[in-house]
Amino acid sequence: MGATRSDDADRVAASSDPARRVVAVLVAVKDLATAKSRLAADFSGPERTRLVLAMLSDTVAAAEAASVVDSVTVVTPDPLVAETARKIGARVFDEPVGDSAQPPDARLNHAFASAAALLRREEVVGHGHGHNSAARVDVIALQADLPALRPAELDQAYISARRGGRSLVVDHHGSGTAALILKDSSGELAPLFGVDSARRHAESGAPKLDGIWPGLRLDVDTAVDVRSAHRLGVGPATAAVLRSLGWSDDASATTA
């Protein structure tokens, strides 16, 4: 269930309290032309586009419904992704201009790092408490393809994260990062998403969180992942797309 109007009012009032931490979720999305290429054998180009946007919608909706989360921001260079994100209530940042020769993973990490820094600068300017205000903003860098995510999983991961630094949630493959959490720290997010990111995040000092969060850990890259998420129970947007493609609801326990 999403946040109610009273929930939103409580969050606004609490965010003005200088002693309270502000939790911002960041979701970075590549351009649709290159998104989810590993699904090409099972889904056509238009089908992949619909699925990517649906998974983003369900991920953002689950994050917005988490009780610890104050805001969700999507960072993307793609206008259709931006339009979708705004329609579901997320804030949108244009992907910052970096080195055009950078590989996709480097661009993704640059987008996460730049957006996290911008959100923290805004907190300093908006509340005028000095540079230490940046440490009031905790950041959760979240994958965009978590259609089976439950809000309670994100709440539990944030609560479990260590104070004074970064923590990570390893994905279901055991090698990737589903979420990187910066909590109660003035340090940088320092994202290292990409190949073998779980190992690289851990080696950079981020401990692995060991909670049982199947939806949070299940990022979708392949058709096998889609089937696993469908069995676990996907959000309404993803369920609608899969239903339109002939997938049976009988095999899925929807998160709606």
Image (tube, rainbow, N blue to C red):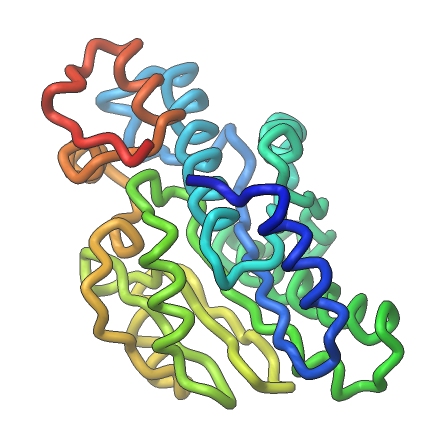
* Image quadrant where one finds the N terminus: top left
**What percent of the width, then of the height, locates residue 245?**
27, 11
Q: Quadrant of residue 126?
A: bottom right
Residue at 50% over, 63% down: 68
Left or right? Give the position of 248 relative to 75: left
In the rendered view, tell whether residue 70 sits above or below residue 48: below
| On screen, residue 209 above or below 214 | below
How many numbered marks, from 0 up? 0
Q: Is residue 221 left or right of residue 123?
A: left
Residue under the image location 53 percent in, 51 percent down: 27
Residue found at the far left of this picture: 251
Q: Nearer the viewer, residue 66 or 42?
A: 66
The vertical placement of 244 against 151, above or below, is: above
Tell me if 102 is positioned left or right of 227 in this view.
right
Report the residue at 58% width, 86% height from top: 185
Instruction: Please state, as top left, top right, bottom left or bottom right, where the C terminus lies in the image.
Output: top left
Decide: is 141 above or below 54: below
x then y, percent, for residue 4: 56, 42
Residue 133 percent location from the top left of the image: 75, 82
Residue 142's quadrant in the figure? bottom left
Closest to the observer, 151 or 54: 151
